[in-house]
Amino acid sequence: MRALVKSRPEPGLWMEHVPVPEPGPNEVLIKVRKTAICGTDVHIWNWDEWSAKTVPVGLVTGHEFVGEIADLGSAATRYPRGLRVTGEGHIVCGTCRNCRAGRGHLCRNTKGVGVQRAGAFAEYLVLPESNVVPVPEDIPDEVAAIFDPFGNAVHTALSFDLVGEDVLVTGAGPIGIMGALVARRAGARKVVITDLNDRRLTLAREMGIEHTLNPARDSLRDLMPRIGMTEGFDVGLEMSGAAPAFRDMVAAMNNGGKIALLGIAPTAFEIDWNQVIFKMLTIKGIYGREMYETWYKMIGLVQSGLDLTPLITHRLPAAGFEAGFSAMRDGSACKVVMDW
Ligand code: NAD
Ligand code: ZN
């Protein structure tokens, strides 16, 4: 089969022919229909410090996908062949304390599809049966293909009560915009999203996020009174991984505010911890999706009318992957979906 392989320890990915993987007893073989490119895949392409120490050379990459079940392992009985599915890309151990307590998203031994085990940028993917998520008929393939990052957004946004609250989202990448959309639908009062990239702020406005801010030109302090905010934000969703964005957020929070941190910073950085103390802020780190509560929320949000399709700016055949990656790398793309 064709697959996008990290076959050399240097920037790039290569389309190669590799054997179709075989499902183990409790696994299923999925015929991949569509995949989407994640920021993580761009890190793997770039072969930065993180990928060089995490990703084995020779790995089939990719983890955002939709497809159909093509074959079943000898003990896999839950789903029929032909079923349209996506799935959770974090494979958990099942034996650590958190796994045994039903908190799989807190597993200490998580392995990532397309990061530490063979991924979805391929004609076929093997996934444990327990990670499979069937896709309801009314959800299009391309939306199911971006469920993985949508789940990051839903997990982050629904970490705290949003009803009637003023919410700040820093970073208007795909996950930030999805987080802001979820906050609106969950009943937030004001939702403000920030980014240095005006194209991304325009997309956020087009998708119904009224208040956008470019911190290179404007400040949250100045914006707040203009939109009828007098005190500070109640909830912050950090979706940029940028130190200045997190510092701005801490400064703009009201006392007692709650922050969910999803953005991954390239290096350690300092913040003013005294503000966290004197404002009595709560800060919660977010990794992945809650298994599997987030998936039920995601499906429900889409089925009740949340439209993610405007986030898909590029649709390409898998053979055009180089164009897709370059659109991701230069910031002109939001989500790139590839057909296999
Ligand atoms: P992205 O890179 O597309 O978006 C980040 C956005 O932040 C960009 O548009 C960038 O212009 C913007 N930004 C940079 N500096 C800023 C600043 N000072 N103020 C405001 N915005 C600024 O990433 P994404 O795919 O939307 O993912 C969002 C973040 O979440 C990334 O850091 C990613 O690594 C991280 N992530 C974390 C998890 C997890 O499980 N914790 C999962 C997926 C992604
Ligand atoms: Zn575990």
Image (cartoon, rainbow, N blue to C red):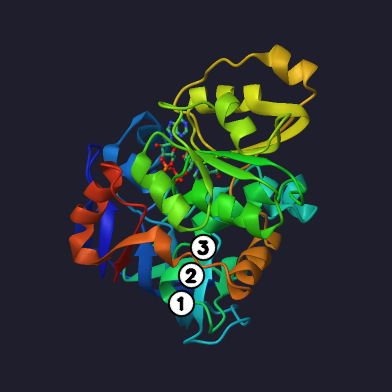
Q: Quadrant of residue 126?
A: bottom left
Q: Position of residue 146 (x, y in %)?
A: 46, 62
13 is higher (above) or lower (below) than 250:
below
Kind of residue at badge 2: Ala
What amino acid type should be assigned to the residue bearing mark 3?
A: Phe
Q: Kindly tell me whether mark 2's CB lies below 8 Å from ligand 1.
A: no
Tell me if label 3 and label 2 are in contact, CB under 8 Å: yes
In this view, the residue in front, 243 or 54, is 243
Disc number at residue 144? 2
Residue 147, labelled with which disc?
A: 3
The residue tagged with tag 2: helix, strand or loop? helix
The N terminus is located in which quarter?
bottom left
- Crowdedness of circle 3 by 10 Å Cα count: few (<14), some, many (20+)? many
Three-letter residue code for mark 1 = Pro
Disc 1/disc 3 C-alpha distance (Å): 11 Å
Q: Secondary structure at mark 3?
A: helix
Question: In the drawing, what numbered circle is on residue 140?
Answer: 1
Q: Can residue 57 be seen in this snapshot?
A: no
Q: Residue at x 30, y 43 (%)?
A: 331
Mark 1 or mark 3: name the one nearer the start of the chain.
1
Spatial separation of the CA atoms under disc 1 and disc 2: 6 Å
Mark linked to residue 236: none
Q: Pick the residue in front: 250 or 38.
A: 250
Left/right of residue 235 with respect to residue 302 in the rendered view: right
